[in-house]
């Protein structure tokens, strides 16, 4: 008998390789999570994880754009993808925006400053007024 375990993340081994001197690493890997049983949650899935030494988030966004556009071109022979009654354009460059700014576009009264913990109450009030469910459960 051999004791086996299921992996919950690929990142630790990849980060060790970056520290060891590999300039770029990636893995398409099976992930197994046990986060509770739910009909809306699949505890087993495949992910792509990649790291690049000395890269910042702008570099990684470029990599993501290149990968997704490359796959769409190969698989669909186009950067315009049908999705239900809509079409999605993957033409570059993609819009780059912070999560805070996207929320602010949808909820103009939303103000949150990570350096000011007291702003959390105002942000929660704006989200609640905009109909975001379960805001009172957030801490």
Image (tube, grey):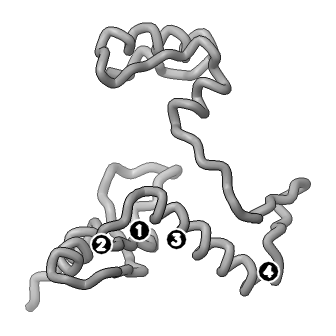
Tag nearer the camera, 2 or 1: 2
Q: Which residue is mark 1?
A: 44
Q: Which mark is residue 76?
A: 4
State the residue lying farthest toward the front.
54
Quadrant position of residue 69 = bottom right
Q: Which residue is mark 3?
A: 63
Question: Residue at the location (52% across, 61% down)?
Answer: 61
**Nearest to N terminus: mark 4 or mark 1:** 1
| Label 3 – label 1 distance at C-alpha | 26 Å
State yes or no: discs 2 and 1 in contact (Cβ < 8 Å): no
Tag nearer the camera, 4 or 3: 3
**Nearest to N terminus: mark 4 or mark 3:** 3
Q: Measured from the top left, where is residue 129 in percent x and y?
A: 60, 9
| Label 4 – label 2 distance at C-alpha | 31 Å
State the residue lying farthest toward the bottom.
1
Q: Is 91 left or right of 7, judged from the image as shown?
A: right
Quick one: 134 or 123, which is closer to the camera?
A: 123
What is the crowding at mark 1: few (fewer than 14 residues within 10 Å), some, or many (at least 20)?
A: few
| Label 2 – label 1 distance at C-alpha | 29 Å
**Nearest to N terminus: mark 2 or mark 1:** 1
């Amino acid at each position: 008998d051999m004791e086996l375990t299921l992996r919950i993340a690929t990142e630790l081994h990849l980060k060790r390789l970056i520290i060891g001197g590999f300039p770029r690493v990636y893995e398409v890997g099976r992930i197994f999570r046990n986060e509770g049983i739910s009909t809306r949650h699949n505890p087993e899935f495949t992910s792509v994880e990649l790291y690049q030494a000395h890269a910042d988030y702008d570099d990684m966004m470029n990599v993501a754009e290149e990968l997704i556009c490359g796959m769409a071109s190969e698989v669909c022979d186009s950067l315009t993808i049908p999705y239900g009654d809509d079409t999605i354009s993957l033409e570059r460059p993609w819009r780059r925006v912070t999560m805070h700014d996207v929320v602010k576009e949808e909820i103009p009264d939303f103000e949150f400053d990570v350096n000011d913990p007291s702003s959390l109450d105002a942000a929660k009030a704006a989200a609640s007024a905009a109909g975001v469910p379960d805001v009172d459960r957030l801490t």
